[in-house]
Each structure stands twice: as C-alpha cells, then as structure tokens.
Amino acid sequence: MIFKCISRSRANRASSTLLLFLFLAVDISAQGKLEFILGGFDKRIEPTFVKYKGDMVNGQPEGNGVAYDAKEQKTKIYQGSWKNGKPDGFGKWTPLFNRIIRSYEGNFKDGLFDGKGKLIYWDEYGNNIGYDGDWVKGKKNGKGTEGSYTGDWVDDMKQGKGTELRNAKTGSFSERYVGDFAGNKLNGKGNIVYNNGDK
C-alpha cells in the first residue's frame, strides 16, 4: 500500500511526504478482521513501526480502520476510510515524525488529499498555520483559506480571485488586498483597502 500526501507549503520547501506501509499478518479475529504490523517509512526519517486494525478485503485495508503507533499503541497515525489499501473517503492523518505537517483531516482519494480538508502545519518561524479548503490529487485546487489569504488556488498556488490581509511594514494587517493573483503574487486588477475604509 502506498499512501502519498503532497504539501507545497512553507514556501514550497515542504516537499512531498511519502509513507510506505509493508503488511505482515499477525492476527485474525473471530469477526474476520485482520490486525497487521506495518513498517512505515518517511523518506526523511528512520523506519518506525505502526499497527493497523480494521476491516480487510483480499489482505488490504478496506472499509474503516486505524493505523497507530505500534510501540505506544495509543497514537493514531491515520483513522478513517480505506479502499484498496489506501486512505479513501473521510479520515484524519497525524504523522508521527514529520517536522512540518501536524495533521490533515478531510477527504482522501486513492491515498491523496482530495475534496474538502484541513491541513495544519508549522511555518519557518514555528507558527501554527493551516489550509482549509479544496484539494485535488494532493494539491490545493479550488477555494481555500491559508493564513491571511482566502480565495482561489490552482496547483498549490494562489491563482485567480482572492483577498489577503497584509501590511509588510508593521505586520499589523492594517490593509486588505482584494483582487487578482497569479503564481502566489498580486497580479492583475485589485484594490488595497485600509482599515479606515480608504482605497
């Protein structure tokens, strides 16, 4: 089973995160559910073991199930819907050792963020940031909010109509830009509106 999630946040420095699960059968319950030990690998960390417990079809997670830390057996890494051995449907993913991503809760398709979902991550200053909105094949696509920006997204970039609170000089968000974006930058028609109503 391959579970792939892509995050281009933190100035596109958060490269894709790839988790690979290897299944080894250890137990069969009376209800026909299997419990598996999985070797989970993040390309930036040493291997860690997680455990899967839930519905299975043809030796793969299918239906509802939980992957959790095999050592503590308390920390849930992924809980939700599975299809063909991959997260598919609604679920919550909380990576154990990812230094950027804290959690994702929302819809998955074929192991990728797809549909409505909320990703929480750390920025380069250690602040808690989130993206809440539409996803397509692991990328921000559609309408969404991240930090002080709300608007359109295409392939993980601010693209189209949007609103961004800003003030580069003081950081006080005393002005609001409403207008066009392209490639994560102000581009096209738009207005800057100040807190006192001036444009």
Image (cartoon, rainbow, N blue to C red):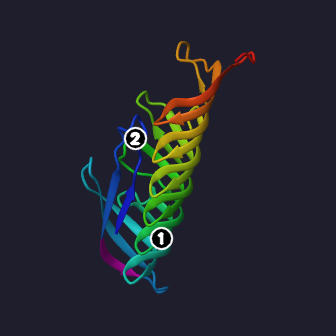
Q: Which mark is residue 82?
A: 1
Quadrant (top left/top right/bottom left/bottom right) for the C terminus: top right
Between 189 and 122, the one lying in front of the other is 189
Quadrant of res 4: bottom left
Residue located at (38% from left, 38% from top): 12
Q: Secondary structure at mark 2?
A: loop
Q: Position of residue 93 (x, y in %)?
A: 47, 55
Mark 2 and mark 1: Cα distance apart in space: 24 Å
> Label 2: which residue?
100
| Crowd class of label 2 (few under 14; some 14 to 19; many from 20; radius 10 Å) | many
Residue located at (50% from left, 62% from top): 108
Q: Which mark is residue 146?
A: none
The residue lying furthest to the top in this view is: 169
The residue lying furthest to the front in this view is: 188
Earlier in the chain: of badge 2 and badge 1, it is 1
Could you tell me what secondary structure mostly forms the magenta stretch?
Answer: strand
**Which amino acid is tagged 2?**
Ile
Between 102 and 26, the one lying in front of the other is 102
Q: Is residue 145 above or below residue 73?
A: above
Does the magenta-highlighted stretch encompass residue 72? Answer: no
Residue located at (61% from left, 21% from top): 173
Cβ–Cβ under 8 Å for marks 2 and 1: no
Between 71 and 19, the one lying in front of the other is 19
The span picked out in magenta is 23-28
